[in-house]
Amino acid sequence: MAANSAAPIHKRKTTEVEGTLGAYFRIQARLSRICLKIAVFGLNVILAAVLYQIWGRYVMNNSPTWTEILALVVVLWVTCFAAAVGVRDGRHIGMESLLSFAPPIVRLWADLVVYAGMIVFGGFMSWGGSDLAFEMWEYVNPGLPISQGWSYVPLGLGGILIIIFAVERIVARVNDVEIIPSWH
């Protein structure tokens, strides 16, 4: 088989874009890093709560009741923020193996359809999560004196973030710009 003699085309990275579009990408990158830091902080809170639960149960023989509920609420926050970052960084489930054989225009349209679908999904997620948060706000979690609405707030915020980051992916794809992942 003959090797492909065409040199690969260098895609501009978001850090190389200037002007208003460059500012847009920098704001999105900063927002994404904040979301990632919140998710990492949340993982540490979950770890501390679980370790405290183990200590209370097996060492002190007095299980704290609030740790499980705290861990469950925080895991929802971590999941929603991390999922939004996954959308921005392009770490979602995809059929890249099939699309790698498709012509560039097919790949472009496939990406646009996928991100448009994510926008619709994020909209429903935000709407449903916000509705649940408002409906459950008056109820208090047993064992942890916070509103049960706090369990659904991350769905509303996560949906908005998914929309924001999916729009950025569309803007980047149309402008043939490569998005730098949040952890770089």
Image: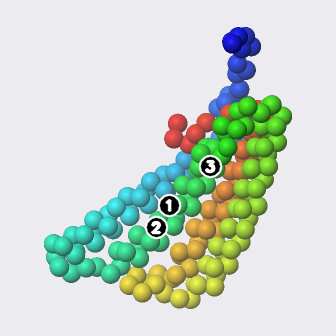
Specify the amino acid type for callout 1.
Val
Residue 36 is situated, as x and y percent measured from the top left of the image, at: 52, 51
Q: Residue at left 76%, top 43%?
A: 111
Determine which quarter of the picture holds residue 132: bottom right
Specify the amino acid type for callout 2.
Val
Which numbered disc covers residue 93? Answer: 3
- Mark 2: give few (<14), some (14-19) or many (20+) Cα within 10 Å: many
| Image quarter in which the N terminus is found | top right
Left or right: residue 120 versus residue 132 is right
The residue indicated by pointer 2 is 74
Mark 1–mark 3 distance (CA, rounded to whole Å): 18 Å
Numbered-mark total = 3
Which numbered disc covers residue 14? Answer: none
Specify the amino acid type for callout 3.
Ile
Q: Residue at left 72%, top 44%?
A: 169
Left or right: residue 108 versus residue 155 is right
Residue 177 is situated, as x and y percent measured from the top left of the image, at: 72, 33
Mark 3–mark 2 distance (CA, rounded to whole Å): 24 Å
The residue indicated by pointer 1 is 78
Q: Residue at left 37%, top 58%?
A: 44
Q: Do the residues under discs 2 and 1 have CB atoms within 8 angstroms?
A: yes
